[in-house]
């Protein structure tokens, strides 16, 4: 039960952290550029719960829907990192703009993954 609660909490942390990412990006652009490192650190920290959800999806053979959404979330997160790294390296405004767009897709999928993990945990508890 405690494991399910921890995993569920971690899953719901992701959408909240992504919303905070949007806020930090806006604040960094329009208020204080010294907040960019905080945006970067939080973005890197998101690898842990997103990777954990992907791993949970792979090992949980009873939740095929979770598996598909969690792996999609991992893929979009990886593309998020690639877009910003390559965009900055080559000075591509297009790739950097796609980073912001891709962030919105990541937010949507993170809500689906969190809800799916919550439902899966409830089914395991109630039998």
Image (cartoon, helix red, strand yellow):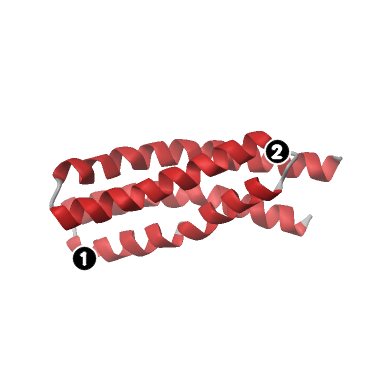
Residue 73 on image: x %, y %: 49, 43
- Quadrant in the rendering for residue 32: bottom left
Secondary element at image label 2: loop
Residue 106 on image: x %, y %: 42, 41
Relative side of 90 to 27, left or right:
left
Per the image, the residue denoted by label 1 is 34
Marks 1 and 2 sit apart, C-alpha to C-alpha, by 42 Å
Residue 115 visible from this viewpoint: no
Q: Residue at x 36, y 46 (%)?
A: 79
Nearer-the-camera pick, 10 or 90: 90
On-image quarter of the C terminus: top right
Are dots 1 and 2 in contact, CB under 8 Å? no
Q: Residues within 10 Å of mark 2 (few under 14, many from 20)?
A: some
On-image quarter of the N terminus: bottom right
Q: Residue at x 40, y 61 (%)?
A: 44
Per the image, the residue denoted by label 2 is 63
Q: Residue at x 22, y 46 (%)?
A: 96
Residue 60 on image: x %, y %: 71, 46
Q: Earlier in the sequence, mark 1 or mark 2?
A: 1
Q: Name the front one of labels 1 and 2.
A: 2
Q: Residue furthest right?
A: 127
Secondary element at image label 1: helix
């Amino acid at each position: 039960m405690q494991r399910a609660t921890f995993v569920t909490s971690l899953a719901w942390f992701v959408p909240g952290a992504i919303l905070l990412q949007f806020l930090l990006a806006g604040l960094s652009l329009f208020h204080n550029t010294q907040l960019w490192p905080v945006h970067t650190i939080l973005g890197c920290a998101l690898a842990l719960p997103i990777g954990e959800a992907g791993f949970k999806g792979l090992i949980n053979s009873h939740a095929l829907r979770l598996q598909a959404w969690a792996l999609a979330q991992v893929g979009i997160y990886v593309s998020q990192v690639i877009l910003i790294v390559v965009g900055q390296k080559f000075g591509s405004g297009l790739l950097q703009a796609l980073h912001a767009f891709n962030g919105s897709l990541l937010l949507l999928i993170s809500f689906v993954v969190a809800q799916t993990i919550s439902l899966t945990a409830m089914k395991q508890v109630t039998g």
